[in-house]
Image (cartoon, rainbow, N blue to C red):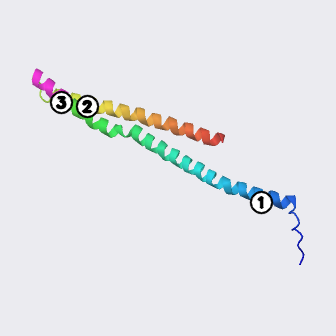
């Protein structure tokens, strides 16, 4: 039997082995980065949903306050139900105006996102 040591590996094979170890080490980092991106995307969606979720509540509050204030004015001035109708209409108009403002804001944000996507 020959007790001589094995010949050393060529440098090219050693480099390939090193690069495979690096890619194995990068896989968990890539996975972590992917999970972080997914979390930030879902967080952004949640934030945008919460940012605009008040619009429905605002409609109810605006009309309800219009009804309450109009009824109070009708009792005070004896004009039932004219002031109630006027105040309800003003509350509804205020809510529609805010809805329009929110829709314009969403459209500006979407346009800005589209412009960023085109630049990339």
Front tag of 3 and 2? 3
Q: Position of residue 83 (x, y in %)?
A: 18, 26
**Marks 2 and 1, Cα distance to the nearest angstrom?**
75 Å
Q: Is residue 73 magenta?
A: yes
Q: Residue at x 22, y 30 (%)?
A: 66
Name the residue that disc number 3 marks.
Answer: 68
Asked which secondary structure carries label 2, the reply is helix
The single residue placed furthest to the bottom in the displayed view is 1
Of 97 and 119, the residue lying toward us: 119
Label 3 crowd bin: few (<14), some (14–19), many (20+), radius 10 Å = some
Query: In what quadrant of the picture does the C terminus appear?
Result: top right
Question: x, y (%) of residue 13?
Answer: 83, 61
Q: Quadrant of residue 27 in the image?
A: bottom right
Q: Which residues are magenta?
A: 69-77
Q: Height in image: 18 above or below 79?
A: below
Residue at the disc numbered 2 = 89
Residue under label 1: 17
Residue at x-position 73% and y-position 59%: 20
């Amino acid at each position: 039997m020959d007790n001589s040591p094995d010949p050393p590996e060529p440098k090219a094979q050693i480099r390939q082995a090193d690069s495979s170890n690096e890619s194995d080490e990068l896989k968990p980092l890539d996975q972590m980065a992917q999970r972080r991106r997914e979390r930030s995307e879902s967080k952004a969606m949640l934030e945008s949903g919460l940012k605009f979720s008040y619009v429905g509540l605002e409609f109810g509050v605006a009309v309800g306050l219009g009804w309450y204030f109009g009824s109070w004015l009708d009792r005070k001035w004896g004009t039932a139900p004219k002031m109630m109708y006027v105040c309800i209409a003003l509350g509804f108009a205020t809510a529609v105006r805010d809805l329009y403002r929110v829709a314009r804001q969403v459209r500006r944000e979407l346009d800005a996102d589209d412009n960023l996507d085109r630049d990339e």
